[in-house]
Image (cartoon, grey):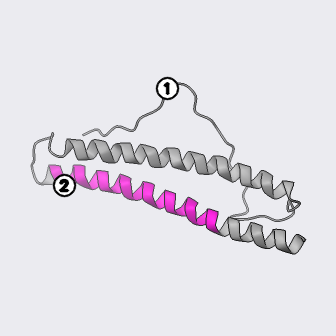
Amino acid sequence: MLKERRLAADLVASEFLKVEAATDQATLLAANCMATMLDQRTKAKLPVGTGLEAIRLISDASADLVRARQRLVEAHAALSKTRDDIGLSAFAYGDQSECPEVRYVTGAAHKLVAVA
């Protein structure tokens, strides 16, 4: 039974780590895209308002990705507890550091904004 639980945990951890990496990569790509848009607008000597709606939408998407990353941090902690609950506390997954502390943002939502 331990063997089956360990295999299940290994498979879940493998997929979860891929999701974490993909979210980080998507967040980085969105930020790079926005930076490139702003940089190229300047280099092309276009008016400051050029592409503003697209920049706003990419900024919103970036904020959504950051919120998704926060949810994954929370899921990471929940998976760690699940690992312990099913008797696998002796096994570690991912890097060997401690799970990140989960901090909940309270109050008004924070928005990413583009500045020029």
Label 2 sits on residue: 40
Point out the stretch of residues depicted in magenta: 15-41
Query: Does residue 99 appear anywhere in the picture?
Result: no
Q: What element does badge 1 sit on?
A: loop
Which SS type dominates the magenta stretch? Answer: helix
Query: As rendered, which of 99 and 108 lies closer to the eye?
Result: 108
Instruction: Look at the image and tell me whether residue 39 can be seen.
Output: yes
Q: Residue at x 34, y 37 (%)?
A: 113
Q: Quadrant of residue 93?
A: bottom right
Disc 1 crowd rating (10 Å Cα; few below 14, some 14-19, many 20+) is few
Q: Residue at x 10, y 42 (%)?
A: 47
Q: Residue at x 69, y 65 (%)?
A: 13
Asked whether the beta carbons under mark 2 and mark 1 sit within 8 Å of each other, the answer is no
Question: Where is residue 10 shown, x and y percent of the image?
Answer: 74, 70
For the C terminus, give its image quadrant.
top left
Mark 2–mark 1 Cα distance, whole angstroms, equals 33 Å
Q: Is residue 39 magenta?
A: yes
Q: Is residue 16 magenta?
A: yes
**Res 88 → quadrant:** bottom right
Counting from the top left corner in percent of width and height, residue 22 is at: 50, 62
Which amino acid lies under the numbered mark 1 shown in the image of this protein?
Ala
Q: Is residue 95 above or below residue 66?
A: below
- Residue on which the image places disc 1: 108
On screen, residue 4 above or below 50:
below
Res 85 → quadrant:
bottom right
Q: Is residue 68 left or right of residue 88?
A: left
Comes first in the chain, label 2 or label 1: 2
Find residue 110 and report its horizontal and vertical position in percent.
46, 33
Q: Nearer the viewer, mark 2 or mark 1?
A: 1
